[in-house]
Image (cartoon, rainbow, N blue to C red):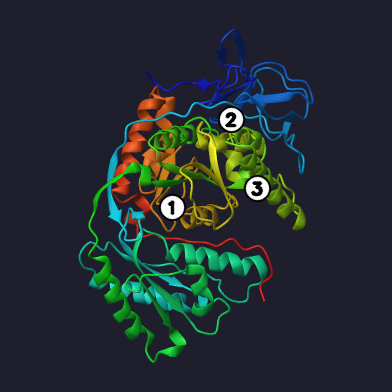
């Protein structure tokens, strides 16, 4: 069968989403409702299924995504010109837990690296982590040189430049130290060179307590101001790290050890219909095999947060989730910014009209499993199952935060497309087939087939198999391109 023309996501919705562009005069039948499009409805955008009065609720995903600015006639295009957010500022919430049946499924294995500390990795790389932006170019030069001397199972030497580590205050300085320490301890790195300048605020001696005890064969330190030739000294240290890391071999490991981050960016009107629900199905499947997933980008939970709160396993987690949401709203207020200045221009062009519209689509990535953990920014995951992580919506910052919390791989859904990477393999999942066809060098997996009569359960199994392959060494597009990005959350003053 061919592509559907439209979809009604929930039986209570008073809108449909156009799968292809609907022309004025096209007839639409949804259950007992039939109407004619009064104007062009772009693909991914919404059309009213019935008359909606001014201030009336617009329902999508079975939930309110905003209120009508004016009377909206059946068959009309619904978008930013005639719908507005219904969200407020800080809110009080009540815990109304829903009963969730926790499913179990047969274990599977992937081919990964067992580390001496009990952690597992899906890559065997050597990382260069600068403590301060002043040594970024040295880090990059060292990585380029060392990649010509790889041996054994070491896949790549990667430098992670960033502009921080000095001239920071308060939480910003703490965030930098925490995230750098998290990356230094990440099991995808078989060896790590911590590269300092010497006079920075977050110098190596200051950073060591954040890192904790280390294996001196795996982690080595270099202060550039204290050596005559940092390139020569750094090269020797990297050769030692490569030799150590080359001793690790891939071996079968239970998928229960996998930690997968979930993020979306450049969303469109299909994201909440195809790619995000698909990742939600993946999350449920991994969790049924005792694995772990992490959902982040708190501002894009606004408007859908109660769905997550009521899935919290206990009252303590509910309270932590309320704090997660309201603390982030307060961050907006403290900086005199509008909490609901979202979605982005690209989101709007793709058919997303309000933050509720965006958030209800974004949270589809969480699947249906109970919330088992709530993490502060930079906190490492400890509990198997679904975890919520405090981080902003910015793609690079949030994806880095997922890696820092322990994610081996990030699943990144997108309707508009993006080439960026993160410190760990970043799987790009397109919400529509047009993007997957156009940007084959960006997109790793196409969820757009779900509006082309492909079965959700079978496609989720295909995605699961793809992720297992990536965990076992298959490179994603951004890795093939040589992209490795990282970004740290900055909130305050730069000295």
Give the SS element for disc 1.
loop
Q: In which quarter of the image is residue 58?
A: top right
- Residue contact between numbered discs 1 and 2, judged by CB atoms under 8 Å: no
Residue shown at the point (58%, 33%) measured from the top left: 311
Q: Residue at x 27, y 76 (%)?
A: 239
Badge 3 density bin: few <14, some 14–19, many ≥20, Cα 10 Å: many
Residue underneath mark 1: 419
Check the image and name the residue furthest to the top.
Answer: 32
The location of residue 128, given as percent across then percent down, is 39, 71
Q: As displayed, is residue 151 above or below residue 405?
A: below
- Which circle marks residue 324 in the picture? 3
**Element under disc 2:** loop
Q: In this view, does 291 lie to the left or right of 253?
A: right
In the rendered image, is residue 354 in sight? no
For disc 1, the neighbor class at 10 Å (few under 14, some 14 to 19, many from 20) is some
Mark-to-mark CA distance, 2 and 3: 31 Å
Q: Is residue 261 found left or right of 354 in the rendered image?
A: left
Residue furthest to the left in view is 152
Q: In which quarter of the image is the N terminus?
A: top left
- The answer to the question of whether label 1 and label 3 lie on touching residues, with beta carbons closer than 8 A, is no
From this viewpoint, which residue is outermost toward the bottom?
A: 228
Q: Is residue 12 visible?
A: yes
Q: Name the residue under label 2.
A: 45
Query: Earlier along the polypeptide chain: callout 1 or callout 3?
Result: 3
On the image, which quarter does residue 41 sit in? top right
Q: Where residue 241 sits in the image (x, y, percent)?
A: 30, 72
Sequence-first disc among 1 and 2: 2
For the point 42% across and 32% down, the residue is: 448
């Amino acid at each position: 069968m061919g592509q559907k023309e439209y979809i009604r996501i929930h039986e209570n919705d008073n809108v449909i989403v156009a799968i292809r562009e609907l022309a004025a005069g096209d007839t639409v039948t949804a259950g007992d409702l039939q109407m004619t499009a009064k104007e062009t409805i772009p693909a991914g955008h919404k059309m009213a299924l019935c008359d909606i009065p001014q201030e009336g609720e617009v329902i999508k995903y079975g939930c309110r995504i905003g209120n009508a600015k004016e009377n909206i006639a059946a068959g009309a295009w619904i978008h930013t010109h005639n719908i507005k957010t219904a969200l407020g500022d800080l809110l009080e919430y009540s815990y109304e837990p829903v009963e969730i049946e926790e499913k179990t499924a047969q274990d599977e294995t992937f081919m990964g690296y067992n580390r001496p500390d009990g952690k597992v990795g899906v890559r065997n790389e050597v990382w260069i982590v600068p403590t301060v932006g002043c040594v970024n170019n040295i880090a990059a030069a060292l990585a380029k040189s060392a990649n010509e001397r790889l041996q054994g199972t070491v896949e790549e030497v990667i430098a992670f430049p960033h502009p921080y580590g000095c001239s920071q205050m308060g939480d910003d300085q703490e965030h930098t130290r925490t995230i750098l320490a998290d990356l230094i301890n990440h099991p995808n790195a078989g060896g790590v060179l911590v590269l300092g300048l010497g006079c920075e605020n977050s110098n190596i001696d200051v950073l060591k307590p954040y890192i904790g005890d280390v294996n001196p064969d795996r982690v080595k330190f270099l202060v550039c101001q204290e050596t005559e030739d940092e390139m020569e000294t750094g090269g020797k240290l990297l050769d030692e790290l490569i030799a150590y890391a080359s001793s690790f071999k891939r071996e079968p490991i239970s998928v229960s050890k996998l930690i997968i981050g979930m993020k979306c960016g450049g969303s469109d009107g299909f994201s909440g219909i195809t790619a995000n629900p698909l990742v939600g199905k993946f999350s449920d499947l991994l969790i049924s095999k005792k694995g772990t997933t992490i959902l982040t980008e708190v501002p894009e939970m606004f408007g859908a947060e109660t769905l997550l709160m009521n899935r919290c396993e206990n009252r303590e987690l509910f309270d932590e989730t309320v704090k997660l949401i309201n603390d982030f709203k307060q961050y907006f207020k403290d900086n005199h910014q509008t909490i609901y200045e979202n979605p982005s221009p690209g989101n709007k062009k793709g058919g997303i009209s309000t933050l509720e519209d965006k958030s209800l689509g974004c949270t589809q990535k969480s699947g249906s499993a109970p919330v088992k953990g709530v993490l502060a920014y930079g906190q490492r995951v400890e509990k198997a199952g679904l975890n919520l992580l405090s981080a902003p919506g910015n793609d690079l910052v949030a994806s880095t935060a997922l890696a820092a919390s322990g994610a081996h791989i990030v699943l990144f859904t997108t309707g508009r497309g993006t080439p960026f990477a993160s410190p760990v393999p970043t799987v790009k999942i397109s919400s529509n087939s047009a993007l997957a066809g156009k940007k084959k060098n960006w997109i790793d997996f196409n969820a757009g087939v779900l509006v082309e009569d492909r079965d959700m359960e079978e496609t989720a199994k295909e995605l699961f198999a793809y992720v297992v392959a990536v965990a076992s060494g298959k490179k994603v597009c951004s890795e093939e391109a040589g992209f490795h990005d990282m970004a740290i959350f900055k909130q305050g003053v730069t000295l």
